[in-house]
Amino acid sequence: MKTLDIQHDAAAQRFHARVGGGEAECVYHQAGSLMNIVHTEVPPQAEGQGIAAVLVRAALDHARARGWRVRPSCSYVRSWMRRHPDTQDLLE
């Protein structure tokens, strides 16, 4: 996979990147110091390339840098965090 140009749109509370003629995104809701990640989506033509994982890592890095806790409401994010023990300290 080529390097993604991940953008953070703080006003829309999402991380996103143009991929395969579409847009992938990781959407969150922030309340104080809690980042509730609610949705991750990758266009069908770009699935299976690790794009969602890169977006989730960017979101979690953002949360960590700000001292936020994370609630993985999105099932993909919940599963991804279970497979990455280095992220467990972020869980609310």
Image (spheres, grey):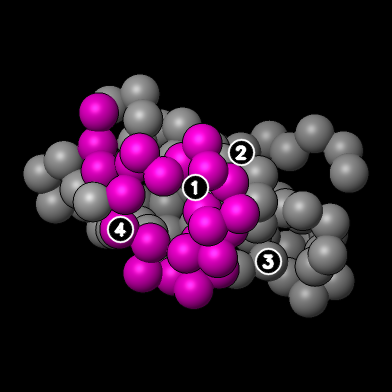
Circle 3 is placed at which residue position? 42
Can you see residue 40?
Answer: no
Separation of residues labelled 2 and 1 (CA atoms): 7 Å
Q: Is residue 43 magenta?
A: no
At 27% from the left and 26% from the top, the residue drawn is 66
Whole-angstrom CA distance, mark 4 to mark 2, is 21 Å
The residue singled out by tag 4 in the image is: 71
**What's the residue type where badge 1 is placed?**
Phe
Q: Secondary structure at mark 2?
A: loop
Instruction: Indicate the amino acid at tag 4.
Output: Arg
Q: Secondary structure at mark 3?
A: loop
Instruction: Give residue 20's position: percent from left, percent from top.
Output: 83, 59
**Residue in the picture at 24% in, 37% down:** 68
Residue 14 appears in the figure: yes
Q: Which quadrant would the N terminus be assigned to in this image?
A: top right
In the image, taking residue 67 as reference, residue 17 lies left or right, namely right
Q: Nearer the viewer, residue 16 or 32?
A: 32
Residue 88: say if magenta. yes
Looking at the rendered structure, the secondary structure element under dot 4 is strand
Above or below: residue 74 compared with residue 23 = below
Kindly identify which residue carries mark 2: 6
Residues in magenta?
A: 67-91
- Judged left or right of residue 33, residue 55 is right
Q: CA distance from mark 3 to mark 1?
A: 12 Å
Asked whether the beta carbons under mark 2 and mark 3 sit within 8 Å of each other, the answer is: no
Three-letter code, disc 3: Val
The residues bearing labels 4 and 3 have C-alpha atoms spaced at a distance of 20 Å
Residue pushed farthest front?
85
Q: What residue do we see at 80% from left, 34% from top?
A: 3
